[in-house]
Structure formats: C-alpha cells, structure tokens
Amino acid sequence: MAYTASNTRYDQMKYNRCGNSGLLLSAVSLGLWHNFGGVNEFPIMKEILLKAFDLGITHFDLANNYGPPPGSAESNLQKVLQSELAPHRDELIISTKAGYDMWDGPYGEWGSRKYLMASLDQSLKRMGLNYVDIFYSHRPDPNTPLEETMTALHHAVQQGKALYVGISNYNAEQTSRAVDILENLGTPCLIHQPRYNMLDRWVEDGLLDVLEKRGVGCIPFSPLAQGLLTNRYLDGIPKDSRIGGASIFLGEEALTSETMVKVKALNQHAEQRGQTLAQMALAWILSRKQITSVLIGASSVSQLEANVASLSKLEFTMDELAHIDSILV
C-alpha cells in the first residue's frame, strides 16, 4: 500500500525558533543513533520514520558513524528519502555530523578540514542528497586549531553542501570561541547538541547561558539518560533492555542504588502529573527557555507516540521544579 502523509501532521506538533535564526524545529526530533543500523530490521525503522513524519516530526538527526556498521543509518534513511518521503524533502530538516572515528588512518576522525569535508561528501552519497540542512562538528579536537574546524563548516555552507552548521559536545568556553569564529566568517552557529537530562545537568554550568546570550539553539541528546529515565528499570534489569544487552553506552554500573532512589522518586512525581517518567523527563527539558528541540530515539512506533505525547503537558509550577531539584540533589 502506497504511503500518503497524514494531512493533520502539523496540527499537534510544536515548532520552536532555533536561536536567532529563521529556522523552526519540531519540539521533538528523531535521532537515528540507535535502532536504524544495518543490524536492525528495515521495515520497523521505516515504519518509525513515517510515523514520526505523520506526527509532525520534521527533523531527523544522524552522524556519519551511526549504525552499526558505521554509515548504515544514513544508508537506511536514503531508502525512505528516495521512496515514501521523496515528495516531502523540503518539509524535512536532515542533519549529520563528523568528529568521531569513522574510517581507518589519520584522516578518519576528529576535526581537520580533510576529515570533515570528506566525511560530508560520504554522508551525502549515502543519503542520496545534494545537501544536508545542518552539518555539525561532532566533538572538539584538542589537536586541530578551532579556526580550521569552523572554517571547514563555513566552507560546507559556501559550497552548498549544508544550509546551516552546528557543534556538539563543546563546553561553554569552546562554544563561545566557535561562535565567534563562525560569526566572523559570516556563517552563524545555528545550534548546539549537548548531552543533557535530569541526571546529567552539566550544561547548566555556563553552556546554556552562552547559547542564550549568543542566540544559538540547543537540542539535547540522551534526554532519557539512555533509558534510565523511563520505567524500564524500576523493578530490575529486563533481559531485552539496553543494560541487559550488549550496549557499550549503558552498563549495569549506571544502575546504582543512589540513582534508583532518584528515579523512583521522579517516577512517583510523574504519576502525580499524569505522565510517564519518560514524558516528564522530556517535558522538563523542553520547559527550559534555551531549548529548541529534544532529540529522542525510538525502537517502536508505540514508544515514539508515547514520547511525542509529552508535548501535551509541558508546564511545571515553581513548586514542582523545586521538588524535582530536591530529588536530584
């Protein structure tokens, strides 16, 4: 049966301005970090992607090495972009990144111009695109001048291979310098993608202030702390969970007794709000004025729908925020 996009796809989704730019991003964006690689089932990932679009999610976020194997998430997205979503390319924001290990040899990671430009060319081929909407430096490189990395991003825009540029995993000082360099080159830094969730609040120590002051958007990844901020682990470790499996990103050591006391208290408050813990965790991030969008993953359509439902209740009273802070101390 041929796919026809829902004609109500823009009715429920919220769209937020990205920093000082003219770009609006869906409040919930879909990341293809997990569950969209060559080891996953293509029919399921296609179903998730199409449902995301039908729910008003217009932003799909990738990186060169998402898989496994590296690059396979971009290749899988291409199959959907060139079939069901082909008529809707101009309704979509597609982002990708380069910075982590992608291929062998000295030019396959970090922040050199050689690596960034070659990686972007490879990503465009894998996705079958002429350009990406956002191209990121995925992490700062301690051994490459920041001017070289930012100039490569600037040239990607000049060459028509990216419409906007961003940075990810940069601290407040690095971000301020990167924004200055890009501003002087004439290509503003659109957005920053940091790790941020209730259990990992490092961005509140200066970074969010820099982003607000400089007019840069913010799209946190890992808003659910790789699943810790869900009901998955309230009663132990399920065998089919990320911790119970072979994930290299979330180990059993993350499930400390101290963390679980916090998670259970947060879950109790979420129930009082009429939300799941995951929904409250997403709403809590989106309630921050500096946040443009929150980047979620999904392994099923039902999980995707449940997370998008967090948008129905984004407001927190001052008392609620104080109570949550007291839990997280």
Image (spheres, helix red, strand yellow):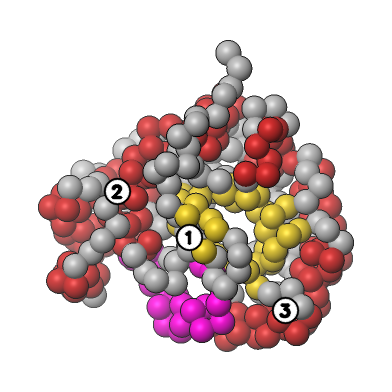
Residue in the foreground of this view, choosing between 317 and 192: 317
Point out the image quarter for the C terminus.
bottom left
Q: Which mark is residue 182?
A: 3
Q: Which mark is residue 312?
A: 2
Q: Residue at x 73, y 67 (%)?
A: 110
Closer to the chain start, of discs 3 and 1, is 1
Closer to the chain start, of discs 2 and 1, is 1
Q: Secondary structure beneath disc 3?
A: helix
**Is residue 28 rendered to the left or right of residue 152?**
left
x and y percentages locating residue 200 in the rendered image: 38, 68
The residues bearing labels 3 and 1 have C-alpha atoms spaced at a distance of: 23 Å
**Circle 3: residue type:** Leu
Residue 202 found in image quarter: bottom left
The residues bearing labels 2 and 3 have C-alpha atoms spaced at a distance of: 37 Å
**Is residue 14 rendered to the left or right of residue 199?**
right
Q: Residue at x 60, y 80 (%)?
A: 175
Q: Which mark is residue 16?
A: 1
x and y percentages locating residue 285 in the rendered image: 37, 63
Q: Residue at x 80, y 75 (%)?
A: 151
Spot the residue most to the top: 1
Mark in the foreground, 2 or 3: 2
**Is residue 285 rendered to the left or right of residue 195?**
left
Asked if residue 320 lies in the magenta stretch, the reply is no
Total numbered labels placed on residues in the image: 3
Q: Around disc 3, counting alpha carbons within 10 Å, would you say few (fewer than 14), some (14 to 19), or many (20 or more)?
A: many
Point out the image quarter for the N terminus.
top right
CB atoms of marks 2 and 1 within 8 Å: no
x and y percentages locating residue 28 in the rendered image: 45, 51
**Is residue 25 rendered to the left or right of residue 255?**
right
- Residues in magenta? 197-218
